Image: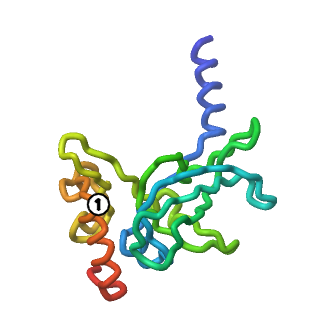
Amino acid sequence: MLPRVLIVAVLLMGASLSATVFVPTEFREVVNDAGLIVRGRITDVRAEVVADRGIESIGTISVDAVIKGAADRFVAVRVPGGVVGATRAVMVGAPRLSVNEQAVFFLKRGSDNYWRPIGLSMGIYRLQYDRASRRTLVNAPVLMGPTASAGRVVRGDVRRAPMAVPEFESLVRLVMAAPSGGGR
């Protein structure tokens, strides 16, 4: 009896299985596609229902530094998903914005003219305070040469160790200054 139940369970599971695969975008593409790159802190998050897209969250970023483009003191960014009433919408790969979270945001205007992160979560580099070094760090991006080799992205690659914010921002400026497609 047990083998038949097991076979039926496996068949039912197989009918509903699906997978999402994320291919990391090379950092040069993220930088080049961004119309606005800012470092800042999320001061407010609210969600609303958008007729043709479902629930979206709108985060307000208090801008500490503008790395590319032009921005006011505050910038609004939209991401898919959020909570409205008793309804929660989640999109795989979409970032969840949280009040007081600090990050470097790589943004591009959407067809609706709102700023949106490049590649959803790939366009947000969260800042984290390291108590041991007393520095604010950012996870290193996938960048051919300085932080990654051609081929697979390898977990634990020492070149992808977290970097200090000034070092990260210098890397962004270096990529911006390089000729398009350079270094590939």
- Residue 165 is situated, as x and y percent measured from the top left of the image, at 29, 60
Work out which residue is located at the far right of the displayed protein and give it: 51
Nearer the observer, 153 or 74: 74
Q: Residue at x 35, y 84 (%)?
A: 181
* Relative side of 32 to 80, left or right: left
Residue that label 1 marks: 165
- Residue 52 is situated, as x and y percent measured from the top left of the image, at 79, 61
Q: How many marks?
A: 1
Residue 28 appearing in the image: yes
Classify 150 as above or below 6: below
Residue 148 appearing in the image: no
Query: How many residues crowd mark 1 within 10 Å: few (<14), some (14–19), many (20+)?
Result: some
Classify 91 as above or below 146: above
- Residue 54 is situated, as x and y percent measured from the top left of the image, at 75, 54
Amino acid tagged 1: Val
Nearer the observer, 35 or 2: 35
Quarter in which the C terminus is drawn: bottom left
Q: Residue at x 28, y 50 (%)?
A: 155
Q: Secondary structure at mark 1?
A: helix
Colour logic: rainbow
Q: Residue at x 20, y 59 (%)?
A: 159
* Relative side of 30 to 160, left or right: right
Locate residue 23: give its quadrant.
bottom left
Locate residue 87: give its quadrant.
top right
Q: Residue at x 54, y 52 (%)?
A: 43
Work out which residue is located at the far top of the displayed protein and give it: 1
